[in-house]
Amino acid sequence: MATIALGIVGYYQFIKGYPLGPELMERLEEYVWPEHNVEIREMNWGPVAIVQDFQANSTVYDRIVLISAVQRGKPKGSVTCRHWIGGKLDVLAIQDRIFEAVTGIISIENLLVIGEHFEIWPKELIVIEVELPEESVGDLVLRELHHDQETGKTTVVGSNPMADSDKKIVLDIAANANIAVRDGLTGLLEVVPLSVKSLNPLAKVCHNQLIGDIKMSTPIN
């Protein structure tokens, strides 16, 4: 019996209509994997805290499956299964990833790099990526406000039924996650390697802000 962790990185526990929200969690929890010991995790906090949580846990995982939103220029809602193969980064590059992580930014890529550095990943680490632009949550909120205007009702944002397009994304994610947990890499029809060379560049905002703050606080002689 394999021990497997299934984690949703950036999980929105209060927004039903978001593809990484309660609807997806409910579908994952409906699956039964009697041949495996599966732990489903909500990973809606920073990468450093997630890595520390894994380090504090004495469980040895045979396989880890992570689900997360990314932006790689594909059509919105595209779901891609990847195998994390890691690779070497210089010390400064790793420090930059950790720096961004401690600012509270939730990033699957920073999580992968930091976890690799601290050697917490098993050989079989599968990443299920869904292409969702940053404005996805904002679009969802606007869609729900428009729905309220049309119906004349006032509802809590995130509580309205999912759009058909989002339902399709959830079903696609859940189906791939089921296979990844049940059969691992051998069961997935198409798996794309993911290494440190494939990662998106870091956001420059927090770094530039820090440098600006330092300059402003430095006395002028």
Image: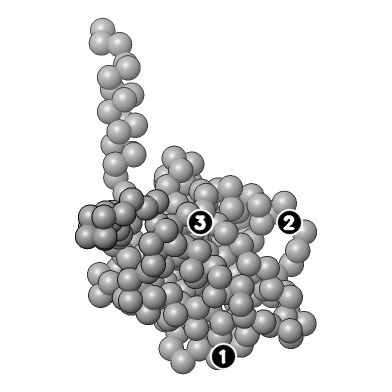
Mark 3 and mark 1 in contact? Answer it, CB < 8 Å: no
Tell me the number on the disc at residue 73. none
**Dot 1 amino acid type:** Thr
Q: Which colour scheme is used?
A: one colour
Q: Is mark 3 on a helix, strand or loop?
A: loop
Residue holding disc 1: 186
Nearest to viewer (mark 3 / mark 1):
3
Residue holding disc 3: 13
Cα separation, mark 3 vs mark 1, equals: 31 Å
Q: Quadrant of the C terminus?
A: top left
Q: In the rendering, at what x and y percent does residue 187 appear?
A: 55, 91
Q: Is mark 2 on a helix, strand or loop?
A: loop
Residue 148 versus residue 96 in the image, above or below: below
Q: Name the image quarter holding residue 121.
A: bottom right
Crowdedness near tag 1: few (<14), some (14–19) or many (≥20) residues, C-alpha within 10 Å: few
**Dot 3 amino acid type:** Gln
Asked whether 70 or 191 is in front, the reply is 70
Query: Considering only order in the chain, which callout, 2 or 3, is on the residue closer to the N terminus?
Result: 3
Q: Is residue 83 visible?
A: no
Seen at 54% across and 68% down, the residue is 25
**Dot 2 amino acid type:** Asn
Q: In the rendering, at what x and y percent does residue 159 appear?
A: 42, 58
Q: In the rendering, at what x and y percent does residue 167 appear?
A: 39, 75
Seen at 72% across and 51% down, the residue is 56
Q: Residue furthest top?
A: 221
Query: Considering only order in the chain, which callout, 1 or 3, is on the residue closer to the N terminus?
Result: 3
Residue holding disc 2: 57
Nearest to viewer (mark 3 / mark 2):
3
